[in-house]
Amino acid sequence: MAAKPEPTQLEKEQMFGMMEKEMEYRVDLFNRLTQTCFDKCIEKRYKEAELNMGENSCIDRCVSKYWQVTNMVGQMLGNRPQM
Amino acid sequence: MDAAAAMAAGGGEEEEDKARMEAVADKLQTRDAIRLYNWVSHRCFSDCVTTFYRRTLGKKEEDCVRSCVRKFLLLSSASAARFAHLADPSSAFDD
C-alpha cells in the first residue's frame, strides 16, 4: 500500500528547467513578434500618437501570420511541437 | 503525527516550489523590461533623430519620440491580446 512516490530532487530540477525554458521561449517569441510587427505595420513618420485603422488591421494580421510561420518552421525543422 | 508532519512538509515543499516559479517569472520580467527599454530607445532614436545641428531635441523630434513610444505600447497591447488567443484558443476573444 504505497502512495504515489514524491518526485525525486533530480526530477524536480528537470521539471523546473523545462518550465523555465518554456517561459523564456514564450517571452522571446512574443518579443520577436512584437518587434517584427512594429517594423512592418507602423508608419515611420509617427505623425499622430494613436494607431490608425490600417495599422490596427495590420497588427492583427501580422501577429496571426507570424504565429503561423513560427509553427510551420518549427514543425518542418522538428524543433517544437504544435503549441 | 506522521500524517501531520507529512502534510506540513508537503505544504512547505509546495510553497517552496511556488516561490521558486515566482522568482523565475520575476527574473524574466526584469530581463524583459530592460530589453524592451533598450530596443524601443534604439528604434525611436533611429527613426526620430536624423540631424545633429543642436545638442538638445527639437520639438518635432520630441513629439516624434513620444508618438513612437506610444505606438509601440499600443501595438504591444494589441499583439498581446491576439497572442493570448492564439496560445489558448479556448479563451474568449472577439475575432
Image (cartoon, coloured by chain):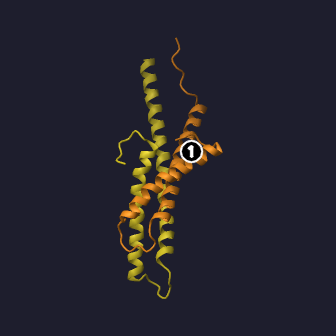
The spot of residue B3 in percent (x, y) is 43, 18
Q: Is residue B67 above or below residue A2?
A: below
Residues B69 and A53: in front is A53
- Tell me, by letter, which chain the rendering colours orange: A
Q: Residue at position x 47%, y 54% from top?
A: A63
Q: Is residue B60 above or below residue B14?
A: below
The residue at which mark 1 appears reads as A21
How packed is label 1: few (under 14 Cα within 10 Å), some, or many (20 or more)?
A: few
Q: Residue at position x 40%, y 59% from top?
A: A57
Question: Which shade is chain B?
Answer: yellow
Label 1 SS: helix
Q: Is residue A78 above or below residue A36?
A: above
Residues B86 and B12: in front is B86
Q: Residue at position x 47%, y 51% from top?
A: A64
Q: Quadrant of residue B22?
A: top left
Q: Residue at position x 49%, y 74% from top?
A: B47
